[in-house]
Amino acid sequence: QVQLVESGGGSVQAGGSLRLSCAASGNILGIRVMGWYRQAPGEERTLIATIRTTGATNYEDSVKGRFTISRDNAKNTVYLEMNSLKPEDTAVYYCIFDTVYEYYWGQGTQVTVSS
């Protein structure tokens, strides 16, 4: 059974940095896209970054230039480097693996940015 395990969340002051990791356990096949969503209290879950098997990336406007998504295909792991964090980045962050068979979600990790 495939599970996505996230790590790296926490609390940081505005302007600081955090790096999130998400590793897949189990036999996961046919990965097409890895990515990250976030959900702030009272708001919808929003896709903020994706990376394809080709390495092509895409970012939501609010994180462009501050966040960097990367992946290690051999380790079935995706990362999100977050720099210049702002209080409005406070949210629960979820990783996803989009495969040809199923769409997998991580359990979520809290990121809190204080001003």
Image (cartoon, rainbow, N blue to C red):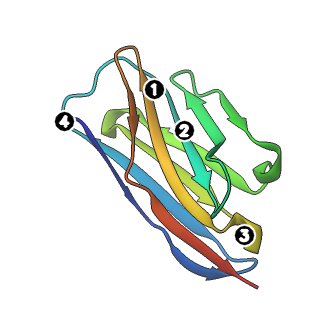
Instruction: State yes or no: discs 1 and 4 in contact (Cβ < 8 Å).
Output: no
Q: Residues within 10 Å of mark 2 (few under 14, many from 20)?
A: many
Instruction: Return the residue at label 2.
Output: 35
Instruction: Return the residue at label 3.
Output: 85
Instruction: Return the residue at label 4.
Output: 26
User: Could you give the CA–CA distance between mark 1 and mark 3, rounded to whole angstroms?
Assistant: 27 Å
Q: Amino acid at mark 2?
A: Gly
Q: Which mark is residue 83?
A: none
Instruction: Return the residue at label 1.
Output: 98
Q: Residue at x 61, y 81 (%)?
A: 12
Q: First in sequence: mark 1 or mark 3?
A: 3
Label 3 SS: loop
Q: First in sequence: mark 2 or mark 3?
A: 2
Label 1 SS: strand
**Quarter occupied by the N terminus:** top left
Q: Is residue 20 visible?
A: yes
User: Could you give the CA–CA distance between mark 2 and mark 3, rounded to whole angstroms?
Assistant: 19 Å
Q: Residue at x 72, y 69 (%)?
A: 85
Q: First in sequence: mark 1 or mark 4?
A: 4
